[in-house]
Amino acid sequence: MTKKTQVGLIFGGNSSEYEVSIMSGHNIYNAIDQDKFDVHPIWITNDGYLASEEDSFKVLKDPRYTIENPHEVANISNLIQLKNLPEIDVFFPIVHGNLGEDGCLQGLFRILNKPFVGDDVLASAVTMDKEFTKILAQRVGVPVADWIAIKRFEYEDANNAKRDYDKVSAKLGSDLFVKPSNQGSSVGVHHVTNKKEFDEALADAFRYDDKVLIEETIHGTEVETAVLGNDKPIVSGVGQIINAAGTFYSYENKYDDDSTTTLQIPAKLPQEIVDKVRANALKVYQVTECSGLARVDSTLRESDHKVILTEVNALPGFTNISMYPKLFEEAGISYSELITRLIVKAQERFDHKKNLLHKIG
């Protein structure tokens, strides 16, 4: 009998996408091929510590389940929970946002010398920062929305021109988006068209990050595609997000039951536009050195049908409504098979990297 691969499924975390992560973890646990894998859920609580496997199973069944931190010292001693598990062969992180997809958790896996699903440290950090993603996308000729970045020390200077709506709008236009540079799932994102909205949006965005982007608004529809693989990745078809008039793809519109947004898979778009979305996605995936998986989001500008990059999500959701698994399902790769492929890609990357020399000898 073939020995099953032991998978450590990590979910939760202390980001604003905590609930989404638990939903994704629940789905992955139920869909994984149990003939090939034994899954050990590892819950990072909203307070940021590792729970026992017993409690991890409980929260997968009831996302409202909570526990108190049993540890006297709230630091790396929390990793002691890992000793109660069998030897983990590969980690599958589905921790979104802060400390989950920004390279921190990925760095821990590297220190533990274990393969893990998803992007490595560099790609995770780069794609988490929307400004660095834009800079690299421009390097390979992928269009992005024009922007201004304002850092906290600039925001705290009452005389800084970046705080002045009139001066900013003279450069970017009066119709703007304000967003934290290092947040996911539309958290802290605001559409503004006047000084009052602009000032309120900046104040809110700085609750989530120390760098905030002010972007020109690209009017059009949102289009997304999914990428899977390492050196020779495959790109899915294209999905389109259709928002109700006067709305955008906010956090609420992504996850609330009364969302006014619909997902169209595959997108009903001309083939040349589909080809451009997919080609741009591959360029950005490669220039940011992604591996494993990523979802690449763009806007199809209504004025000229130009494809403008929005962001790269290096650890997309796996909920029932998430675009990433749905796009590959449309491409003929089932949810369960997708999980298997991601684990295989993680192991292939690990096997390759362990053959690289790190010292002269």
Image: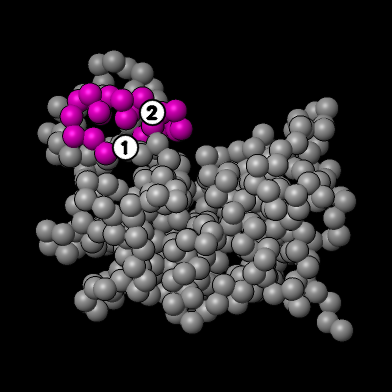
Q: Are marks 2 and 1 in contact (CB under 8 Å)?
A: yes
Residue 335 seen from this side? yes
Give the residue number, with chain letter if any, for mark 2: 204
Horizontal and vertical percent position of residue 100: 59, 47
Secondary structure, mark 1, is: strand
Of residues 280 and 350, the one drawn nearer to the viewer in this rendering: 280
Disc 2 secondary structure class: helix
Residue name at image x 52 percent, y 65 percent: 293
Which residue is located at x 36 percent, y 39 percent?
A: 189
Q: Could you tell me which quadrant the C terminus lies in? A: bottom right
Q: Dot 1 surroundings within 10 Å: few (below 14), some, or many (20 or more)?
A: many
Question: Which residue bears the numbered disc 1?
Answer: 190
Characterize the local packing of mark 2: few (<14), some (14-19) or many (20 or more) Cα atoms within 10 angstroms. Answer: some
Q: CA distance from mark 2 to mark 1?
A: 9 Å
229 sits to left or right of 278: right
Q: Nearer the viewer, residue 210 or 37?
A: 37
Q: Percent position (x, y) of residue 174?
A: 15, 36
Residue at 24% over, 79% down? 271
Between disc 2 and disc 1, whose residue precedes?
1
Q: Which residue is nearer to you in this view: 40 or 231?
A: 40
Query: How far from the left and from the top, in percent, is residue 216?
Result: 21, 43
Three-letter code for the amino acid on which mark 2 is drawn: Asp
Residue 207 within the magenta-colored segment of the rendering: yes
Span colored in magenta: 190-212
**Residue 291 visible:** no
- Can residue 333 be found in the magenta stretch? no
Q: Amino acid at mark 1?
A: His
Q: Is residue 8 above or below residue 97?
A: below
